[in-house]
Amino acid sequence: MNFSDSKKKLALAGALCGVIAAVLAYFGNPANMAICVACFIRDTAGALKMHQAAVVQYARPEIIGIVVGAFVISAATKEYRSTAGSSPMTRFVLGIAIMIGSLVFLGCPLRMVLRMSAGDLNAYVALIGFILGIATGIVALKKGFSLGRAHETNKMSGAVLPVLMVGILILAVGTTLLASSTEGPGSKHAPIVIALIGGLLFGAFAQKSRMCFAGSIRDVILMKNFDLLSVIGGLFVVMLIYNIATGNFILGFDTPGIIAHSDHLWNILGMYTVGFAATLAGGCPLRQLVLAGQGSSDAGMTVIGMFVGAALCHNLGLASSGTAADAEGVITAGAATPAGKVACIICIVVLFIIAFVGNKRKTA
């Protein structure tokens, strides 16, 4: 089924993704984090022992499923196209910046929308930064920014990341080599079969609908085109209904247990970084996984950058802390760390250099 030829079908695709997210939340994924690309890459990086934060180590089947699901559906519909060669190192750096910004905010754009649907006002604050970051990226695009044209390559090249993801799944299921949290967010997950099927379906629907959180806002600003926003709207509405029905809708800022903080400036700047970097890279974290699944080695480099960024965040203390309550009910407010704030500013400076200095339009 082609979901991209009408707004109604796009909204349906978003709603189906919302149903998948609701199922994952119901069966055990962390509260207010039914599916989050940044958080789940961080957990998977931890499982691979790229970082040693014991509470966020688990090979998330959803990440594996999204990549493999996009690969399978694109191959089945003859949309698979193996490409490479479009500024790979720049894309790698953009992937790192996306992850640092995400973990300063505590979530990717997908989780931002899921948090919004659960009443988390911090996510609405962060949306301001995300839109401003995308707008900054659009200015760069209008001034001629480009990562260059990707070229056709052998078909096996584009299949490398999907194969690696399957390898991680095999290691997770068939061996004890990978780390797995016994407490904290990493210990909370849906059963592996449900999580994998959910990821496969989410990846397939995202591929067919071109779901992209940065791209949807970019299209609105650049072309007054609201088509891709229909996908996000469908997802939001379904999750809003789910959260209200299950009592998970709590309107407020400092809400313990949802892995969020109310350090407003850094919520804004974290998602500003994500929006800016995603626009330059050509897609949000979810879109990068899908593009990598359908054959783009360039998107694969961005994904690898996100894995490295996740490791840096937890090895260097860049990730923010979430508001939490102890056994006595005493609330400790979460916040961005000093190192995370510095890293976020560095990322923004680097993004400006990439966007406006290193890629100027050539003149005759």
Image (spheres, grey):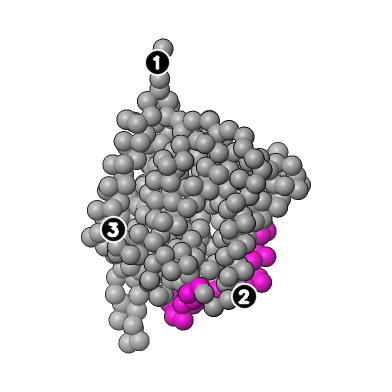
Eyeballing the image, is 320 above or below 275? below
Instruction: Look at label 1 and name its amino acid.
Output: Thr
Judged left or right of residue 216, residue 279 is: left
Residue 90, x across and y down, in percent:
41, 40
**Res. 328 in view:** yes
The mark closer to the camera, 1 or 2, is: 2
Q: Residue at x 34, y 71 (%)?
A: 323
Q: Residue at x 57, y 65 (%)?
A: 168
The mark closer to the camera, 2 or 3, is: 2
Judged left or right of residue 304, residue 339 is: left
**What's the CA distance linking mark 1 and mark 2?**
56 Å
Instruction: Look at label 2 and name its amino acid.
Output: Gly
**What's the CA distance linking mark 3 and mark 1?**
39 Å
Is residue 159 a member of the stretch shown in magenta?
Answer: no
The image quadrant that residue 121 belongs to is bottom left
Q: Residue at x 26, y 62 (%)?
A: 337
Q: Residue at x 55, y 74 (%)?
A: 189
Q: Nearer the viewer, residue 200 or 255?
A: 200
Would you call the spot at circle 2 few (<14 residues within 10 Å), some (14-19), or many (20 or more)? Answer: few
The mark closer to the camera, 3 or 1, is: 1
Label at residue 363? 1
In the image, which residues are magenta? 178-203
Residue 160, x across and y down, in percent:
60, 51
Label at residue 340? 3
Label at residue 174? 2
